Amino acid sequence: IQNLFIWNRLFLLVFCNSTESLIYFSLAVLQALEDGLKRADADPSVKAVTICGENGKFSAGADIRGFSSPNKQGLGLGPIVSLIERSEKPVVAAIEGIALGGGLEVTLGCHYRIAHVQARMGLPEVTIGLLPGAEGTQRLPRLIGVPAALDIITTGRHISASEALKLGLVDEVVEENTVEAAIRLANRLIGQPLGHRRLSLKPVPKLPNMEAFLTEALVKVKKRAQGCLAPELCFQAIKAATEQPFADGVRKERELFNILLTSGQAKALQYAFFAERAVEKWTTPSGASWKTASPQPIRKAAVIGLGTMGRGIVTSLVKAKIPVVALEQDLEYLNTGRKAVMLLLEREAMKMEQGGQTLDFNNPARLQFAVDFDVLRDVDLVIEAVFENMALKKEIFNKLSRICKPEAFLCTNTSALNIDEIASVTSRPQQVIGTHFFSPAHVMRLLEIIYGRHTSPTTIATAMQLAKVMKKVGVVVGNCFGFVGNRMMFPYVQQAVFLLEEGSRPEDVDQVLEDFGFKIGPFRMSDLAGLDVGWRSRKDQGLTGPTLAPGTSARQRHGYRYSPLPDLLCEKGRFGQKTGKGWYQYEKAGGRTAKPDPWIHSFLSEYRDTHQIKTRFIDQEEILERCLFTLINEGFDILAEGIASGPEHLDVVYINGYGWPKHRGGPMFYASTVGLPNILAKLQKYSEIHPDVPQLRPSAFLKKLVAMGNPPLNDWMSYLHRQSNKL
Ligand SMILES: CCCCCCCCCCCCC/C=C/C(=O)SCCNC(=O)CCNC(=O)[C@H](O)C(C)(C)COP(=O)(O)OP(=O)(O)OC[C@H]1O[C@@H](n2cnc3c(N)ncnc32)[C@H](O)[C@@H]1OP(=O)(O)O
């Protein structure tokens, strides 16, 4: 796996990997590195050493799959880094492409580091639930100081070569051949003293107020971590570097690393890492995939509608350097939309400038605003982002079908509507696809990509490629009401509201789910999104409002339990943050700080009296189980119906679009950790208590998996196929 060349008194150690495009460390690579170093050390003709990667890539760190292998003896990279550092011959790292995790830690053992201008570096272990366990938490603060090391290690962010140079992480940045530059430097260093370059011998740079700095930093780290253990343990390891000698710090690092390595959180985060990459390789039940379809180039796109969603989508396209035409129905709406888009772009440009990048949006060739559909004649793809109204969407798609060139793709940004019905009014249903962006669309990473009955594989491939270019996580799903995300969200929110009827307060329910790790609970979320959105949809469905049949029972629809609570709030004008009142009260209309509202408390108790519901104390366990297990239960139905091709899809949707805590791996991964028999038993229990709530009745697929002995998550789908084969 590793090539070693001796060349003109210089030993060149090259990380190679014959099968993978990225180089990550296996036991064999580590062994070869150790052997190579020892050989270089023992050979008197060798005067200096350079370490580099093959084909312009240094290393992506340890093979993440190795962390869940039962044989973890190979986790001994630290001693090899020390071996590099102790070498009496100068060792220079030539960093090209990426140097991440263990890869960067290897360079910290080297006496000098040279990076290519386009190289990226980082210690992303925290993102997979670990810490830099090859002595990185002890060497990095000694090299670049505690504040910068803390930032890099606890966030796991990648840094550019220029930032690395500014921080002192690398000694030199080159634009040409990095390996040659490293060899030249290594040759110059022969015979020079190296003691001052050994990081383990250096003290951690002092801060005038180290204690106060660390206390404040810990508060920030914990706040950002939202229940994830790794950032705090990264912090503890760095703190040890400030308090203890190097060897003791390393012992502490190892101890903390082992806690993380065996934690459920690390397993969940590593699962999430691979799940995200698995959904990128989409397939449909008919067998379409990247192998059978090629994405078409998008040279120019259009967005119709400059409301909240449209503005974010335009911003994302501009950031992805795709020329875009933004269309509104009249000049008044266009001007409002244009101002809002320009403001978003200015803010994005400012953020990008801080990272040394530029954003060109004042060029009409890049961004054009119009009210006339005729400007859409030459676009390759249109994203319609008007509000959720089937009649309006159909009118627009019919027009698009007539105006756009025959090969143009037509996307609809919808969170629930039927893609087939929208496609039916066009002459090209094979080029119609759903693209469900999440608000704010220029920030949120998730893009649900919904194929209809006639959508072609090429259209799916093109939408997936667009997601990639826009730096979003595209998840291909089938067409059903609410698709994956909102369909699973519905029973979760429904349970939350039922809990209010039975005795909870909005803040009790939110607290339990936020303690679980959700960024915001269901009621805070509802206030943020606006209660009127769901109200409009329920009115369209005839569940409330003027079309409701007279005499319909207040708390029943179609024979099942229904809660009119959200409708009643809307009737009182309580739409959430935008009106300053919803499930909570806010300082003003548009305010952001949710305060429990005594009005809601008395409203709820009057409501219970009116409907003769006996208020009871509901414990945290019941709140959590009823909300989460109904969401998971719906997930099993989605899998059984073939709406998503695996549990990873559901998990990636929830992590990236719904604030599900990543360190719990997503709802289906979480279900596998709770154990499917436990989930089934609880659903059966609650379903017996609430027979009028179909969402609590266990999914047939869940029951089947339990009957099959609770197989691991990776095997779930194979049981589904067995079932359909039998049918
Ligand atoms: C037997 C047990 C022991 C074995 C282990 C021995 C080594 C022990 C060393 C111990 C040292 C402890 C401390 C060190 C810890 C670490 O180094 S942890 C790892 C840190 N590194 C990362 O977290 C990097 C993760 N990767 C990425 O962020 C990205 O992949 C990338 C490098 C930035 C590249 O991005 P992109 O070009 O978009 O490609 P991707 O699609 O993301 O990846 C391509 C394929 O490569 C797979 N992959 C990437 N990195 C790793 C990795 N580190 N380990 C395993 N696999 C990796 C990725 O899954 C993709 O695979 P496919 O989907 O199959 O194509």
Image (cartoon, grey):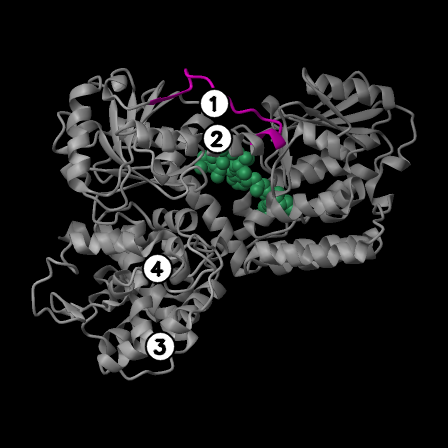
Q: Quadrant of residue 561?
A: bottom left
Q: Nearer the viewer, mark 3 or mark 2?
A: 3
Marks 1,2: beta carbons within 8 A:
yes
Query: At numbered mark 3, what does the secondary structure look like: helix, strand or loop?
Result: helix
Which residue is depicted at the point 61% across and 23% down?
A: 56
Question: Which label's residue is closer to the chain start, 3 or 4?
Answer: 3
Tell me the CA gap for discs 1 and 4: 52 Å
Kindly tell me whether residue 465 is visible in this rendering: yes
Q: Which residue is mark 1?
A: 361
Q: Quadrant of residue 85?
A: top right
Question: Which label's residue is closer to the chain start, 4 or 2?
Answer: 2
**Mark 2 closeness class: few <14, some 14–19, many ≥20 residues within 10 Å:** many
Work out which quarter of the rendered image holds the N terminus and state it.
Answer: top right
Q: Is mark 4 within 8 Å of ligand 1?
A: no
Residue 70 belongs to the span the image colors magenta: no
Between 291 and 363, the one lying in front of the other is 363
Which residue is depicted at the point 24% across and 73% down?
A: 687
Question: Which label's residue is closer to the chain start, 1 or 4?
Answer: 1
Question: Which label's residue is closer to the chain start, 1 or 3?
Answer: 1
Residue 353 belongs to the span the image colors magenta: yes
Tell me the CA gap for discs 1 and 2: 7 Å
Q: Which residue is mark 4?
A: 711
Question: What is the tally of numbered marks visible in this picture?
Answer: 4
Which numbered tag is attached to residue 103? none
Q: Quadrant of residue 112?
A: top right
Please, what is the three-letter code of the amino acid marked with disc 2?
Leu
Q: Which residue is mark 3?
A: 602
Measuring from the top left, give residue 70's x and y in whole percent: 54, 55
Tell me the CA gap for discs 4 and 2: 48 Å
Tell me the CA gap for discs 1 and 3: 51 Å
Please, what is the three-letter code of the amino acid marked with disc 3?
Ser
Q: Which residue is mark 2?
A: 345
